[in-house]
Every structure is written in C-alpha cells, then in structure tokens.
Image (tube, rainbow, N blue to C red):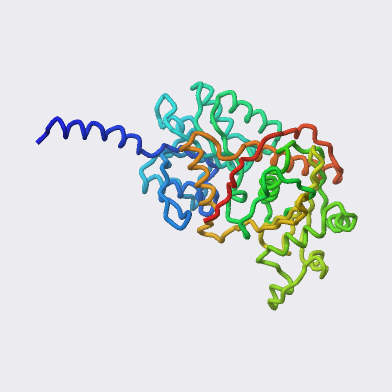
Amino acid sequence: MLTRRSFLQTAAAIPAVAASQPKRIAMLATAYTPLSQAQHMGDRFLVGYPYGGVWRMPEAKLTSLYVEKKPEGELSGARAREFGFDVYSTVAGALRRGGKELAVDAVLIFDDAGEGGLFEQCLQVFEQERRGVPVYQDRQLAHSFEKARTMFERSRRLRFPVLGGTSLPVTWRLPAIDLPVGCRVEEALMVGVGEGREFHAIEGLQCMVERRRGGETGVKSVQLLEGDAVWKAGEAGRYSKELLISALSRSDTPLGFSDADSRPQNLVAAGQLQVLARHPAAYLIEYRDGLKAAVLMLDGAVKDFNFAARLSAPRQVLATQFLVTPEPNATHSACLARKVEQLIAGGAAPYPAERALLAGGVLESCLTSKEREHARLQTPQLKVAYQAPAEPQFAQA
C-alpha cells in the first residue's frame, strides 16, 4: 500500500540512484587489439580491475568507441556485442553517441601514430560544443612539442582537465619511496628498457625530479648519445657511475652471468654493461635550474626500469624500481586506470599534464640531437614550469 511516508522515502531515493549511475566514457583508439594499451584500459572500464587488494568496479563505464583500424583479431566488435555499446565511424559520432550533442562524461585517447590526430578531432567537437569533458591522452599529446603545447593551451581555454602519460609514474615502487617535496637534488639517473619506451623512461625520471626544491622549471639543453659514446660520457663524468650502480642495484632482472648461473654481479664494475647492452643510448638532460640528469636505455643488460638520485641536506642517495608486471594481466595498468577514474570522478587531474608535455618535448629534442650528429641542443622552447602534487601518486597497496 502506497502511503505518504513510503512515497516520500521513494522520492528521496531517486536522486541517490541517479547520482550512482556510472560516468559515460568514449574511447578513441588507433585499434582495439589484444595486449594494446587501448585493450588494457578499455577492458578495465568494462569488467573492473584489481587495486589495493580488492576487485574494483569503476564508477565510469565505456559507452562508445571509435577505432581507426580494424586489423584481423581486433576486439572492438566483440566487446561492443558483449557489453552493449556502439562502435562509431567518426570521432564526433562516438562523442555524441549518434546524437547532436556531446553525450559522454569523459574521453580516453590511444593514438598509436602519436601525431595528435585523435585529440585534435576531440578538440574540434569540444570547440563546437563550447565545452569539454575530462580527457586522458595516452603518452604525450603529440610527437611535436609545438603541436602538443598548442593543444594543451586550447584545453585550458575550454577549461577541461587533461591527464597524460603512462602507467610508469603510478605503478608500485620497490622500495615504496618518493623524493621529498622541496628536496635539493644534485643529480638524477633513470635506467630504461624497451624499444619505443623512451618516453616511459623520461616520464619516470620526470615524476621524481619535479618534486625538487622550487618545483619544475623546464629544460635548458639535451643531448642524445649512442653506442660507445655512452660509455665515454660516463668516464668523463657526464652522468654519475655511482648513481648508475645504485639504480641497477634495484633491478630484479640483471642479465649476463646473473641470468646464466644466478651469481650476483655489479654490472658496472664488472664491465658487463658494455658487453650486454645491445644498442645503448644516453639522454643527457640539463634543467633550467642547473639540475643534471640522464636516462640510459640499456636493452640487453636488464629488463626493468630503475631510478637513483643524489640529494643534499641531508646528503643521501635514494633508488627504486618502477614495477612493470607481466602480460597478459599487466596489472601496473590498473594503477593508471585508478588515476583515470579519479580524473573522471573529480573533474581534475591528479597530477599536472605539464609533466607529459615536458617529457614529450625532451624526447623530441633528443631525437633532433640524433639527427644533428648527436649535438648538444639548447631548448628554450621547453620552459615548462609547474608544481608537483604534495601527495605521492604511485600505488602503495
């Protein structure tokens, strides 16, 4: 029997039910293929993901999809049929879900070409609508720093939050440390691996050193060295061999003798880096405030990402490993999914998009250094200043 009390109780519950509806996500991707980042992240917003020792169902759900390519074995059609969303033939169609107005609460972009084309099309729709919604852009906004900066500035004019980058800054660390906010950093070094993962390594460095005293100031110069020039730069003191030893001491995957017969080894002191690293590369970075840092890509010597920095007052060396978990689960991507969920729920990026903007600019300038016979290049365009969040952003549970 319907009474006034039961009616009022039911009516009062309606807003709460409506408020609990998941946020609607449109995903724009080059392709939705197995083990791609689009698949890792898209699936997490369909079926949930493990985080903090529980299975988390996000308060946001994939509701529309646009893919540029559909190679054999891609998953967009199968996922759409299984989970009841539509695949659209245009970016605008996915954002408006077939209607005439913006009909999603957030956008995830996975542009394998790296030219910023998908983000540009998204911006065009937002500008037509005169409003935007939170956007996660995988890796950098575009390979071109000038293009990325222009798109970033357009997002600021439309006042919608952007989160960029990879899972490396937010995955677990072994040990679970961060640089103290406001610390004095004398020098820093990052060891990275993986073809096409240079941006990941630079971003991993950046998420640490941006916490130094005065915040991020931008980059003054860069130089990319390759082959024997990498080892000569170490002998000349252009990067710290002490920090390299410290970073590699955090690695769980030393190769060479360790891989062959399990013996522990100091890869630097034993001279094994020169033997093992197949195509060594050193990205030498000088920041505008005087900090000097290096990213060493050492495929063949280790299989993981490791960081070390020398601090003063008190003088100490801190080192950690950025944990990259194995496929197919790649649960480090779940740490990124949690940050994307925070972006969508709170309407604000948990850490500045300027980080990815600067890291992308450093990578582009280093590749230009390579084209110019590995010359040291001044980078006045990389005057990107920002403050890191006070609270650590990496997974700790």
| Spot occupied by residue 144 in the image (x, y as percentages of width and height) | 70, 35
Q: Can residue 78 be spotted in the picture? A: no
List x then y, in percent, for residue 261. 70, 78
Q: Position of residue 364 (x, y in %)?
A: 74, 40
Q: How many marks?
A: 0
Q: From the viewer's side, name the closer residue of 30 and 248.
A: 248
User: 295 or 211: which is nearer to us?
Assistant: 211
- Where residue 371 sits, quadrant-wise, is top right
344, 208: nearer the viewer = 208
Q: Residue at x 67, y 44 (%)?
A: 181
Q: Residue 181, can we see it?
A: yes
* Apparent side of residue 195 relative to residue 292 in the rendered image (left or right): left
Residue at position x 43%, y 56% from top? 54
Rendered residue at 75%/56% (across/down): 317
In the image as oriented, which residue stretches furthest toward the front? 314
Tell whether 329 sits left or right of 221.
left
In the rendered view, would you say 152 is above or below 236? above
Percent coordinates x, y for residue 224 in the rendering: 81, 47
In the rendered image, which quarter is residue 320 located in? bottom right
- Quadrant location, the N terminus: top left
Q: Where is residue 356, by image quadrant?
A: top right
